Amino acid sequence: MTNVLQQFQVGQKVCVKELGSGCHVKVIPNEQEGPVVVEVDPEYIVLDDDAAGIKTRIPVHLISVGDLPPEPVPAAA
């Protein structure tokens, strides 16, 4: 199993999408809006969202990385 924390470094901006069983976290360019990684621990990452005034700690077992799975398209009735 690859360590999902290897791709995160302090100072990077990320995009976070909440999933039913955790969070999908993806590194984004610094020009985009998003929270900043302020701590990388073997057990979790800490994100600081200055715009919202919130710090969030996400445990490693709840983090998924890579491409998001496509959202289901509702079938026509």
Image: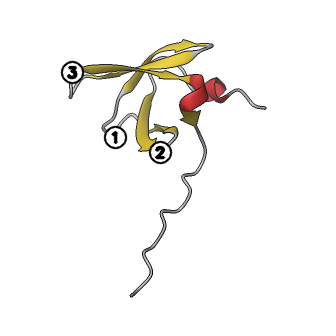
Q: Quadrant of the N terminus?
A: top right
| Residue at x 42% of width, y 43% of height | 17
Specify which label sits upstream in the sequence, 1 or 3.
1
Specify which label sits upstream in the sequence, 2 or 3.
2
Taking the image as shown, residue 32 lies to the left or right of residue 44, namely left
Q: Cα distance, mark 2 to mark 1? A: 25 Å
Do the numbered discs 2 and 3 sit on residues whose CB atoms are within 8 Å? no
Secondary structure under the numbered disc 2 in the rendered image: loop
Secondary structure under the numbered disc 3 in the rendered image: loop
Q: Cα distance, mark 1 to mark 3? A: 17 Å
Q: Is residue 45 above or below residue 15?
A: above
Q: Is residue 21 above or below residue 42?
A: below
Do the numbered discs 1 and 3 sit on residues whose CB atoms are within 8 Å? no
Mark 1 highlights which residue? 32
Amino acid under disc 3:
Gly
| Residue at x 47% of width, y 45% of height | 20
| Residue at x 65% of width, y 24% of height | 6
Mark 2 highlights which residue? 20
Residue 63 image offset from top left, x and y in percent: 56, 32
Specify which label sits upstream in the sequence, 2 or 1.
2
Secondary structure under the numbered disc 1 in the rendered image: loop
| Residue at x 61% of width, y 45% of height | 66
The label nearer to you, 2 versus 3, is 2
Q: Quadrant of residue 30?
A: top left
Q: Which mark is residue 53?
A: 3
Q: Cα distance, mark 2 to mark 3? A: 24 Å
Amino acid under disc 2:
Gly
As drawn, which residue projects farthest toward the bottom?
Answer: 77
Q: Nearer the viewer, residue 21 or 50?
A: 21
